Structure formats: C-alpha cells, structure tokens
Image: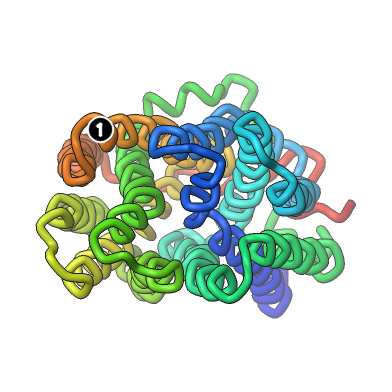
Amino acid sequence: MSDSTHKRAIFILAGAVFATMLGNGMVMPFIPVYVAQFGLGGLGAGLLFSVHAATRTVLLPFIGRASDRWGRRSFLLVGVLFYALASLAYPLADRVAAFVGIMAVHGTGMAIVHLVSMAYVGDLAPRGEEGQYSGYMNTALLGGIASGPVLGGILRDLSSMSVNFLTMSVMSGVSFLLLAVLLPPVESIRTGPKKSQPASTRPWQLLSCRPVVGVASFRLAYACTNALIWIFLPVLAARLWALSTTQIGVLISVNVMVSTVLQAPCGRLADRKRKAVLIALGGVGSALALAAVPFATAFWQVLALNICIGACYGLAFPAHTAVGMENAGPYGMATVMSLLMMSHGAGMMVGPLLFGAIADQLSLAWVFWAGGLINLGLIIACWLLLVGAPSKRQVEPLRPVNSDPIEAD
C-alpha cells in the first residue's frame, strides 16, 4: 500500500467518523432535558441511556468477530444508516416505549461505527506506533463529540430539538457519502497477505490476557465518567446555576475538547513511555476531580474541574487503546476492540441506573462522590493487571478472511 493511499484512507475514515460523532454530540447531552417534557425523571433518563449502552454491549462481540472475518467497509455503511434512522425517529416519539426503541437503534449504529473504525486503524498501525495511530482516530472521534454539544446547545436555544435531530441526520448522510464514494478500494490498501483467524482462538480467551483485561477495566472507569459528565453534570449545572443549554453545551464540550487536543501528542508519548504509568496518572487524576465537583461553588470552578478530567483522560486514552492493539494478534483486532467497547457499554448501561438511583435516593453530590470512588477502584485494578505483564504485539495484525479491513462492496 502506498503512503499516499494510506493517508487518504485514514483521512476519509476520520472525516466520516468526525461527521457522525458531531451529529451524535448535538443530540445526546440534551436527551435528559428533552424527555423531561414527557414526565421522565432522573431514573427514566438513566434508563434510556442504559438501553443505548445495553444494545452496544450485546452486539459488540458479534460485530467484532464478523468484521474480523468479512471486512470493514459494509459494516461502517450499515452503522451510519442506523444513525440516520434514529435521528429521523426522535421527533416522532412521544412515549417511553418509543424512546427506548430509538435509543436501541442509535446504540447499534454507534457500536458499529466506533468499533469498526478503530479496528481498521489498528489493522494499519505499524508496530510501535499504535499510540500515534489511535491518537489520530481518537482526535476525529472526540473532536466530533466535543463540537456537537456547543453547536447543539446553540441550535436548541435558537430553535428547537427538532433542528438538532435534523442536523444529526445530515451529518449521517455526509458520513455515508464519504465512506461509500471516497474510501479507497480493497486492492489499494492491502498491507500484506490474508491471514485467517486461528480456529482454536475464541473471543472469551481474551480474558486470559492480563493487559487487555487491564485496559478493559480502565475503559469501564472512563464510561462511568462519561455517564456523570453527559447525564448528571447538566442536571447539576441547571439546578445550581440555572444555565442555558448553550452554557451547558460549552461546559461538556470543554472536557472533550481538552481531551481531543491531547490525543495526538499523548499518542506519540504512549509509544515512547510506559503505558501503564500514563493510564494510572490519568485515571487517578480524573477520579479525584470527579469527587471534587460537588464542592464547587461557582461555574468557573466546575469548569476547571471538567478541564482537569478532560486532560487526565487525554493523557491516558491513547495508551489504553495502544495496549489493546498491541495484544490483538491471536484474537483479531475488532475482537479486542469489541471487548474494550463492551466494557464501555457496561459502564454506560449500569452507571446511569446506579447514579440515577443515587441521585433520587440521596443527592447529586453523592453521585459524583460514588463515581470518584468507583473510578479509583477500577484504575487500581487496571494497574495491578498491567504491572508485570508488559503489552507486546506478538504477531502481525490479523486480516479478515476473504476480505481486507475495508472491502469494496
């Protein structure tokens, strides 16, 4: 594969992922506020996000296994179509059952796009540069998520949530066109001979790989933080400071923007330094900042804490992805990525329900204190699993059977 074709493939995939996540970010932070008009409280909003996460969690291992065997491109196109369907269906919903179904469709699309795009990048990452390559894709992914809440908050203040849903649909269309029309054909990105996945290897054997299980624990902590930032921080901000949706969007976006800016440089850092140390520093720092949120007495204080959380995860995130890529050889790149995202999905499935119950029974302050303690425990578990088990890529990345990472349909 030529270097120019390589760069073209990465650029097009990153552009499609950015557009998809931009639309997603314009909608998801405001769902709790939007559904409140239908009588759903904190626990109800948590239920919707749990359904969204549960769908991803259930489907990820099947998507990962199939993508490792049959290629990437067609899966990406289907995932983007699910995004479009969800965005068009949201304005038509007026009851809990309808929202549950839409969130399931939305979660399916997110599972496919996120998993397959990261697996594709892992297929192309040269040995020793996994952190750098994961940093590239994470920049596009998080950049879309960071920009979405700001744009979504402005549009909702100026018009209504219907405009946000429509814009999400447009972004999904842009992503579909980029992938369907511009993504290079399979022959132009071939990196080597096809290799089938060993018949004796099964997805659950990943649980014997200490580094992969370790970074899965980190990903679970990251998901719990996301649940707090995206679901309960807007509620806390609205109650304490009566902020507009634009201000809430800015508050959320700053967290992701800081993390986005750090992805590329911290990805390069992860290729040179010990990844376990970077993950531990970022995880502990974010846990402490989360626990400090209830003590904030002004908007600028919670903003500063949110920036700290974004910086900590910006430091740790590329390193955890690189560990997964390095250890993917015996299992398949998408299979390993699916385990990490299943951990994320489990956190987003259980976390909102748990934190929603804590908010209803105790207070919002206890939500953030509990989140900080849970995160700290998971980071300690991650450290213990990584120490003494340095992650090395033992074999070259696997290629799908009868296909390449992005096949020409």
- Residue at (76, 68) in percent of width and height: 174
Q: Where is residue 364 in the image (x, y as percent from the top left)?
A: 23, 44
**SS category of the residue bearing label 1:** helix
* Residue 25 image point, x, y percent: 54, 61
Lateral position of residue 175 relative to residue 342, left or right: right
39 with respect to 78 (left or right): left
Q: Which residue is painted at 50% across and 56% down in the image?
A: 30
Relative to 89, say whether 138 is above or below.
below
What residue is pinned by disc 1?
Answer: 358
For residue 362, above or below residue 74: above
Q: Which of 66 and 109 is in front in this view?
A: 109
- Left or right: residue 11 versus residue 41 is right
Q: Can residue 268 be seen in this view?
A: no
Vertical position of residue 190 compared to residue 198: above or below: below
Instruction: Pick whichever, 159 or 270, lies toward us.
Output: 159
The residue lying at 81 percent from left, 52 percent from top is 407
Q: Nearer the viewer, residue 303 or 212?
A: 303
Residue 159 can be seen in this image: yes
Q: In which quarter of the image is the N terminus?
A: bottom right
Q: Mark 1, residues whose alpha carbon is within 10 Å: few (<14), some, or many (≥20)?
A: some
Residue positioned most to the right: 409
Instruction: Look at label 1 and name its amino acid.
Output: Ile
Q: Horizontal placement of 398 versus 283: left or right? A: right
Q: Position of residue 194 (x, y in %)?
A: 73, 45
**Residue occupying the point 66% across, 71% down:** 15
